[in-house]
């Protein structure tokens, strides 16, 4: 008879940050730990404090906790060692960074007593840490029940840590020690091939950690070539062979679980980098094709957890067949693999990103998502006048290779395409209609399709707000086409009533509020009908950037333009801006919203839609057609690295993109941003006009930039980035140097760093500049220490000394046009010793920038004349769009 009801085996390797929490979740079980649970902790050669943590608990509970140690060999070897010491009736394999719910064991115990013939019982997984929510296989836990896999083959099970297995069954199996990943799936399904049933309970759950630093065995395995071929051979193929040996065929549930798990291999982003030679690639493909030959097409086609991309790709590989079937008479295009239809091109929609009138032309841009070959597709816009005359405009192809619209590959094979296009059509006095034609041609056959049109959520038109007014024209979307008609009050009023009617008949959130805004806008726009309105903004809660300084200059100009600055009225900045001008408007207020709808331009230093558009979080599709505002991007800082992945034309569609250097401008125009030369202008940053080289104060300014991979306190405090900053704060040699020479050290944290300030050990002699103006800090400081932050350009503009001090962690941007070694404005240092020497050298030389770096500053910046605001203002004044 077993000594304990449960044995929990936990293998650990360098999980000192999590192990205590995991152990406590076992000890704290409401079933009663000491009477019912054996906990076996197996150290797999850790070099951190894990073993000390484990031994400290064994000392408290010597009758329940057994600590074993071995050389590092992997989780399978550690678990196999634990298997030799089991004294419980049911066994679980809790991962050392996960934890049980408080009632997990009592719930499992109750279930097993009610179902004495069941050998395996599982509970659902709930993610925590980096990822939250339910595991994608939790659908099988809808009710407590027994799952018979011979009938319910589509209820696969692989997660061993959330399962409890009867020892009398489990003792006949071992974990495969040659598998770096997949030993859980293999172990569990070897047993299931024999027992074919397992129980599930939804009365408790298993807490499954997804680490922020992605340092788990699973995370690392996915980056290894062993995740590919080895797993297919030793895990998937072994299960197939075992099933055939026992039953003469591969059981459906085994096919199903392997198809599901193959998805991780097929969609891997590292496939093209992982193999060293063609032999390894050939071996991988031989294994994959062999596995697919055992999986029925129906299993793949009806799989509830494979998306259509993976399904169609697997069937294409399995059939080794792909062809295009064109029916020109019915204008239909099919992509097929034998009889399986991979794609119906004629059913695809085109989605528009923007529709606007600019410079007396109608500009339209959109995309088609398809599995067709891009070279076979072209788009035409067809302009038709009332007298029947047609003009065809061929759409321009646009690529966005750094964004989510790049061509998707599966195992190196191009599989999902984004066909991005733009077209410009001259505005004329007559009314006309514009429809779109998709032309597909392959091997001499062709079809002309009329795709259905839809709109992206950020487009300025939607199904509920399907028209806009600009320059005496109304652009209306109706009957799958765009109609450009001359403005009349009656026609606009008619369309407004139709929009209201459509909104009222919908179930859309905020529909009544949107109608209220429409009514107010109708009267408000009459008042502003002949006025030009500009809105200026930085962050909603901050007024200390390019927009502020341009606003300060612009309000002094006599030009009959209504100018307003937008900022949160709960901040000190609101009253500060009131000292500059009376037209300061509370962000998100009704006045802000109404002004946004009549504005000609919004002039901002940031691109976040939720900061620019006050309707962004209020079901914005109900308001879209009411505004034709042009977005003018002043930038928050020099674009130092390739930022095309997020400052993309199809999403932002800037009217103006201001740069401070021709090198910066060229990097944007010649990069993957897809902004034209007339949009990107080297005019200089307005805030630079306020920079003065004031050496009146002895200040050393420390401004490291942010690391995007950091998400919470735990990942932050364990990072090299935290250590790098905290070590600087507590470098006694540098602190003494500053004290002895009368210098003050000011730490100005990055906006995203502010929530973590309290985690640092900051001595009292370092000032944390949370509320200080950037401009004041730049003007008054003598030396800047930063790692990569583009604030160094502001400091360099003043020709003050800069030190690039860097830790060893990897930064989140790739290098672009700017080379720190040959173009940087200061020395790059990596150690605190060299940093000390450099600071000391500058102090001894009255904080003077070296001539070499002054020459680089002069070469980089196009202007240094304090006329940046004037240039930007005059460009905006002269370009109405």
Image (cartoon, helix red, strand yellow):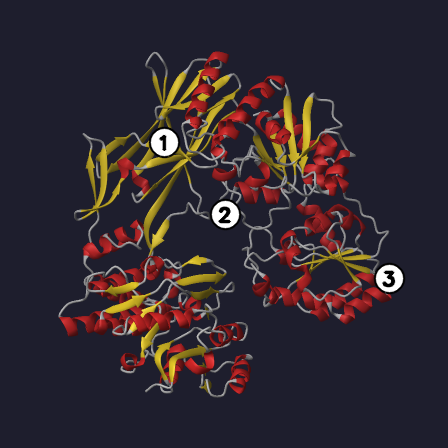
Placement of 568 over or under 61, stated as above or below: above
Side (left or right) of 791 relative to 374 = right
Where is residue 137 drawn, in percent x and y? Answer: 34, 59
Location of residue 521 (image quadrant): top right
Crowd rating for badge 3 (residues with CA inside 10 Å; few <14, some 14–19, many 20+): few
Where is residue 133 drawn, in percent x and y? Answer: 44, 57
SS category of the residue bearing label 3: loop
Crowd rating for badge 2 (residues with CA inside 10 Å; few <14, some 14–19, many 20+): some
Q: Which residue is mark 2?
A: 645
Placement of 289 over or under 517, stated as above or below: below
Placement of 502 over or under 231, stated as above or below: above
Side (left or right) of 700 relative to 643 = right
SS category of the residue bearing label 1: strand
Side (left or right) of 248 relative to 280 = left
Q: CA distance from mark 1 to mark 2?
A: 25 Å
Where is the N terminus found, in terms of image quarters? bottom left
Query: What number is the disc on residue 51?
Result: none
Query: What number is the disc on residue 742?
Result: 3
Where is the C terminus found, in terms of image quarters? top right
Q: Residue at x 19, y 51 (%)?
A: 321
Q: Nearer the viewer, residue 879 or 560?
A: 560
């Amino acid at each position: 008879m077993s000594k304990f009801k449960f044995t929990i085996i936990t293998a650990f390797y360098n999980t000192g940050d999590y192990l205590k929490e995991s152990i406590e979740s076992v000890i704290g079980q409401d079933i009663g730990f000491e009477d019912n649970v054996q906990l076996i902790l197996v150290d797999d050669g850790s070099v951190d404090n894990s073993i000390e943590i484990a031994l400290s608990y064994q000392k408290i509970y010597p009758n329940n906790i057994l600590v074993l140690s071995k050389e590092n060999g992997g989780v399978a070897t550690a678990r196999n060692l634990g298997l030799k010491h089991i004294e419980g009736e049911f066994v679980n394999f809790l991962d050392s960074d996960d934890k049980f719910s408080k009632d997990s064991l009592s719930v499992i115990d109750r279930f097993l007593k009610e179902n004495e013939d069941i050998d395996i019982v599982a509970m659902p997984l709930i993610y925590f840490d980096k990822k939250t929510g339910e595991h994608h296989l939790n659908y099988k836990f809808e009710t407590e029940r027994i799952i018979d896999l011979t009938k319910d083959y589509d209820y696969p099970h692989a997660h061993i840590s959330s399962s409890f297995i009867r020892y009398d069954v489990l003792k006949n199996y071992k974990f495969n020690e040659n598998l770096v990943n997949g030993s859980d799936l293999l172990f569990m399904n070897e047993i299931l091939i024999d027992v074919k049933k397992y129980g599930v309970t939804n009365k408790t759950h298993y807490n499954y950690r997804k680490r922020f630093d992605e340092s788990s065995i699973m995370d690392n395995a996915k980056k290894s070539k062993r995740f590919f071929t080895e797993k297919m051979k030793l895990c998937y193929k072994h299960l197939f062979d075992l099933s055939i040996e026992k039953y003469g065929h591969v059981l459906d549930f085994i096919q199903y679980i392997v198809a599901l798990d193959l998805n991780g291999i097929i969609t891997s982003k590292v496939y093209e980098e992982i193999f060293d030679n063609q032999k390894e690639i050939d071996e991988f493909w031989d294994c994959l094709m062999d596995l697919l030959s055992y999986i029925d097409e129906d299993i793949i086609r009806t799989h509830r957890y494979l998306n259509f991309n993976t399904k169609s790709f697997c069937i294409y590989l399995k059939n080794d067949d792909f062809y295009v079937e064109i029916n020109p008479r019915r204008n239909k295009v099919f992509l097929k693999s034998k009889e399986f239809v991979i794609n119906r091109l004629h059913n695809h929609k085109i989605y528009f990103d923007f529709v606007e009138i600019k410079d007396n032309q109608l500009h339209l841009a959109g995309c088609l998502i398809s599995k067709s070959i891009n070279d076979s597709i072209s788009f035409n816009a067809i302009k038709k006048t009332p007298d029947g005359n047609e003009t065809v405009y061929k759409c321009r192809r646009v690529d966005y290779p750094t964004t989510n619209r790049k061509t998707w590959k599966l195992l190196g094979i191009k599989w999902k395409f984004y066909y991005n296009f733009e077209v410009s059509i001259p505005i004329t006095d007559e009314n006309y209609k514009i429809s779109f034609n998709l032309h597909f041609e392959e091997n001499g056959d062709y079809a002309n399709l009329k795709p259905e049109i839809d709109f992206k959520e950020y487009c300025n038109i939607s199904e509920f707000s399907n028209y806009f007014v600009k320059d005496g024209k109304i652009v209306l979307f109706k009957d799958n086409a765009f109609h450009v008609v001359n403005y009349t009050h009656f026609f606009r009023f008619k369309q407004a009533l139709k929009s209201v009617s459509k909104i009222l008949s919908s179930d859309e959130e905020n529909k009544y509020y949107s109608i209220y805004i429409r009514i107010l806008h109708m009267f408000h726009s009459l008042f502003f009908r002949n006025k030009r309105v500009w809105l200026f903004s930085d962050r909603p809660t901050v007024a200390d950037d390019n927009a502020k300084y341009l606003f300060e200059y612009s309000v002094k100009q006599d030009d009959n333009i209504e100018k307003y600055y937008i900022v949160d009225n709960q901040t000190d900045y609101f009253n500060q801006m009131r000292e500059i001008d009376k037209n300061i408007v509370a962000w998100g207020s009704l006045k802000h919203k109404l002004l946004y709808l009549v504005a000609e331009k919004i002039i901002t230093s940031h691109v976040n839609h939720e900061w620019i558009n006050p309707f962004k979080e209020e079901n914005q599709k109900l308001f879209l057609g009411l505004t034709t505002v042009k977005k003018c991007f002043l930038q928050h800082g020099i674009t130092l690295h390739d930022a095309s992945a997020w400052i993309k034309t199809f999403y932002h569609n800037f009217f103006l993109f201001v740069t401070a250097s021709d090198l910066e401008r060229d990097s944007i125009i010649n990069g993957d941003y897809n902004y034209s030369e007339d949009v990107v202008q080297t005019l200089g940053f307005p805030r630079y006009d306020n920079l003065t080289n004031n050496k009146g104060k002895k200040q050393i300014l420390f401004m490291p930039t942010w690391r995007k991979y950091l998400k919470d306190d735990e990942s932050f405090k364990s990072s090299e980035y935290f250590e790098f900053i905290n070590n600087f704060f507590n470098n006694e040699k540098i602190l003494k140097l500053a004290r002895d020479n009368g210098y003050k050290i000011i730490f100005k944290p990055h906006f995203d760093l502010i929530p973590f300030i309290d985690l640092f050990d900051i001595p009292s002699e370092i000032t944390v500049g949370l509320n200080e103006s950037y401009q004041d800090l730049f003007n008054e400081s003598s030396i800047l220490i930063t790692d990569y932050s583009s604030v160094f350009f502001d400091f360099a503009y003043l020709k003050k000394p800069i030190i690039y001090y860097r830790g060893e962690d990897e930064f989140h941007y790739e290098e672009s046009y700017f080379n720190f070694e040959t173009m940087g404005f200061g020395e790059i240092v990596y150690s605190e010793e060299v940093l000390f020497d450099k600071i000391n050298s500058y102090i001894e030389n009255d904080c003077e920038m070296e001539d070499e770096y002054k020459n680089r500053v002069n070469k980089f910046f196009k202007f240094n004349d304090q006329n940046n605001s004037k240039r930007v203002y005059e460009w905006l004044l002269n370009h109405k769009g």
